Image (cartoon, helix red, strand yellow):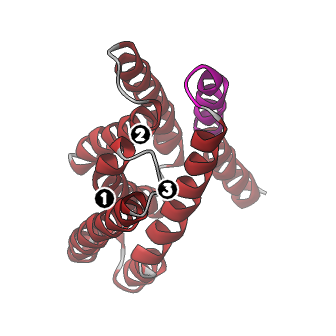
Amino acid sequence: MTERKAFLDTWKFFAIAALPGFLSNFWVILRSPGFLNAEDFIEWAVLTSSIVLLCCLSQLGIKPGYMQEVTDKGVNNRYSAFTSSACLLSVTGLLAGICLFCFFKSLNYFQLWTNTSVLFSLPIFCLTTNLYVIFQTDMRIRQKAQELAKLSIIQTILSLIIFEAMLATGFDFLLSVFLSSGISNGIICVLLSFR
C-alpha cells in the first residue's frame, strides 16, 4: 500500500506542476482580444502548432534515451549523460528556432505572414523549451516531483510578470507571449543547473 501511495503522491505533484501552465495560457488568451485581430489569432495558432511540432522533433528522442541511460548506470552516474543531453538539446532547440524564424520570414517575404516581430523570440524560446524538458526529466528521475511542482508555479508567475511588463512597455503581444516564456524557462534552467 505504501508504494501505491508514493505513486499517487508523485502524480499529484505532476498534476500540480501542469496546472500553472494551463492557467497562464488561459490568462494570455483572456488578455488577447484587446491586442489581436482575427488574422493575428490565426497566426498565433499556426505558430504555436509549428513550435510544438518542431520542438518535439528537435528533441530527437533524447528524453527516453536519457532515462534509459540513468536506469542502466544509476542516478549517481547520470552527469555525463545529462551534460551531453543538455548540450545536444540546446543546439537542436536553437536550430529549430532558427529554422522556424527562416520559414516564417520567407512566408512574410511572399506576403503570407504578417507578425514578424515575434519571430526573433523563436530561437531562445525553442532552446529554453528543450533545456527545460531535460531538466524536468532529470528531476522526475531523481523523484523530485514536489520540487518540480514548486518550480512550475514560480516559472508561471515569473512568465506572467515578464509578459505583463513587456506589454506595459509597448512590446508586441505575440513577442511578449513567446519571449516571456523563453526568458522564464531560461531562468528556471539556470536555477536548476545549481541543484
Query: How many numbered markers are drawn?
Result: 3
Front residue of this view, candidates 56 and 54: 54
| Residue closest to the far bottom | 72
At x 46% / y 40%, what residue is drawn?
147
x and y percent of residue 76 in the render? 29, 69
Disc nearer the start of the sequence (3/2): 3
At x 21% / y 70%, what residue is drawn?
87
At x 60% / y 19%, what residue is drawn?
34
Looking at the rendering, which quadrant does residue 32 occupy?
A: top right
Q: Is residue 35 magenta?
A: yes
Looking at the rendering, which quadrant does residue 40 occupy?
A: top right
Residue type at numbered disc 2: Ser
Q: Is residue 109 above or below residue 71?
A: above
| Residue closest to the far front | 110
The answer to whether 35 appears left or right of 59 in the picture is: right
Q: Find the distance from the CA under tag 2 to the CA under tag 1.
A: 11 Å
Q: Nearer the viewer, mark 3 or mark 2?
A: 2
Disc marking residue 127: 1
Disc marking residue 143: 3
Q: Could you say whether the residue bearing mark 3 is in a helix, strand or loop?
A: loop
Residue type at numbered disc 3: Gln
Mark 2 highlights which residue?
181
Disc nearer the start of the sequence (2/1): 1
At x 40% / y 32%, what residue is drawn?
176
x and y percent of residue 96 in the render? 35, 69
Residue type at numbered disc 1: Leu
Tell me which segment is drawn in magenta.
19-36
